[in-house]
Image (cartoon, grey):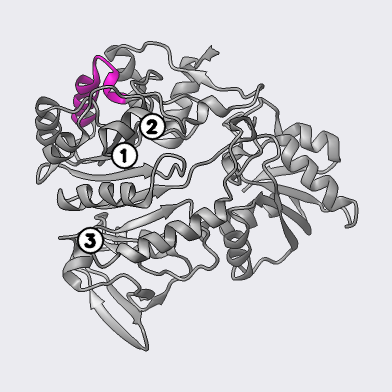
Amino acid sequence: MEYATRDYIINTVFETNILPLTSECNTSCVFCSHRQNPPGVEVFRLPRLSLDDFKEIIDFMSPDRKIVIGESATRIIEGEPLLHRDFLGIIRVIRQKFKKTPIQITTNGVLLDERIVAELVKLGNIELNISVNCVNPLLRRQVLGLKADNIRDKICMLRNKLRFSGSCVMVPEYLKWEDIEEIVALLNDNGADVVKIFLPGYTAMSGKILDLYEAFKAAREFVKSIRDKYAVPVIVEPSFVSNLECKIEGVIRDTPACKAGIKPGDVILKINGDSVRTRVEAFDRIYRLANPSVLLQRGERQIEIKLVKGRNVSPGFVVLWDADPDMAVRIKSTVKYHGAREVLFITSELAFNVVTKLFEISGFDFNYEVISAKNAFFGGNIKCAGLLTVPDVTEAAVQYLSCNKKPDLIMLPYVMFDSRKRDLLGKSIKEIEQQLGIPADTI
């Protein structure tokens, strides 16, 4: 496996505001995606970077967006950030350069101790995402490969000190719903903001079979069954969103939304008198505004409330991710640049419904069709845009063209490509253009 070049790392940081620290990991999770990659996937390990290296790399980050550490969003293999010997030094450098920018750190929590927590509290405006995955020691050994570890102590250490959320991967062959509820209860009792239940993605290489939609329905039923027992919002990802209605999934304790009386199930209709089109638009608008007035639909009646909050402060409610209407603006500009009148959009199976709904309200002045491509290369129950490959979308386009006229332009999800417009196999978007004889661009 190759190491990521300095240019690749810097470009990743510049584009995503995600700072990768290390590819090393201290667990051996049964659901680890890297074990399931088919041959040919082009991923990179991080070289050993010093504190001085990070002082240079951090210059390419934006102070206007949350800085994220420990999340995997590119081909760089992300490990456990606390394993870096200069972890606290790197966080100090970030905070020294960006005094007020929020920092989010995703960790499995194994290496958390009083000293690290105290330092993070001192630096301020830092939140943790703890990948709990299971609480029972025997299960932790089976699922995570940990011999001696007490995640309860780590979570209790955070109570009333740092903002944090927690998550688990729903692995049916190991975890029962009571095991997941044990995680929810632990996080709820210690003041977590949100609990996320991730559905496992299994490639064809895993040899495992799991119907993602059926798993989602089961997880949603579980969440519904415990909703009245715990104050902490619990959500399932990925979510099968079928509409753009801005429904509140949960409300975080002691936040502006909580104090204003917003409740799960409320639907946001207007903000400062202006209608909203999607969940993403509603959340982003409220985030940016100070003291916005929000019109809610609650059952049969409408309620107007004022959220007492500052600019660029989280309102404290939780919604599922759908689509940003600004995407439609970018699409119009790209289509105009290509002079296209007939456009074919190819998206993932997961995103198809949301993309279709967004386009219906976007007022495009060109003809278009939307189709979904199967994640044939990875196989299994993988259905996301980030794991589509050039062969996947080419095959979908060939099938479409077998019974439809040729479009002027094909548009693809930008997340399936890196900054060089290459997919996870290292194949270029230009290969699609050459094979099909049609210009291709990204959404």
Give, as a three-letter code, the residue at label 2.
Val
| Mark with earlier residue (3, 2) | 2
Instruction: Check disc 2 and report its element: helix, strand or loop.
Output: helix
Q: Position of residue 189 (x, y in %)?
A: 16, 52
Residue at numbered disc 2: 143
Q: Is residue 443 left or right of residue 4?
A: right
Frontmost of labels 3 and 2 is 2
Kindly tell me whether residue 321 is visible in this rendering. Answer: no
| Mark with earlier residue (1, 3) | 1
In three-dimensional space, the C-alpha distance between marks 1 and 2, rounded to whole angstroms, equals: 8 Å
Name the residue located 36 percent from the left edge and 84 percent from the top edge. 299
- Quadrant containing the N terminus in the rendered view: top right
The image quadrant of residue 131 is: top left
Name the residue located 26 percent from the left edge and 37 percent from the top edge. 136
The image quadrant of residue 370 is: bottom right
In three-dimensional space, the C-alpha distance between marks 3 and 2, rounded to whole angstroms, equals: 25 Å
Frontmost of labels 1 and 3 is 1
Give, as a three-letter code, the residue at label 1.
Cys
Range shown magenta: 81-96
Q: Is residue 72 left or right of residue 256?
A: right
Q: In the rendered view, would you say 350 is above or below 354?
A: above
Q: Position of residue 345 (x, y in %)?
A: 70, 53
Instruction: Check disc 3 and report its element: helix, strand or loop.
Output: loop
Name the residue located 22 percent from the left edge and 48 percent from the top edge. 187
Callout 1–callout 2 Cβ contact below 8 Å: yes
Residue at numbered disc 1: 134
| Mark with earlier residue (1, 2) | 1
In three-dimensional space, the C-alpha distance between marks 1 and 3, rounded to whole angstroms, equals: 18 Å
Magenta: main secondary structure equals helix
The image quadrant of residue 58 is: top left
Residue at numbered disc 3: 230
Q: In the rendered view, would you say 367 is above or below 418?
A: below
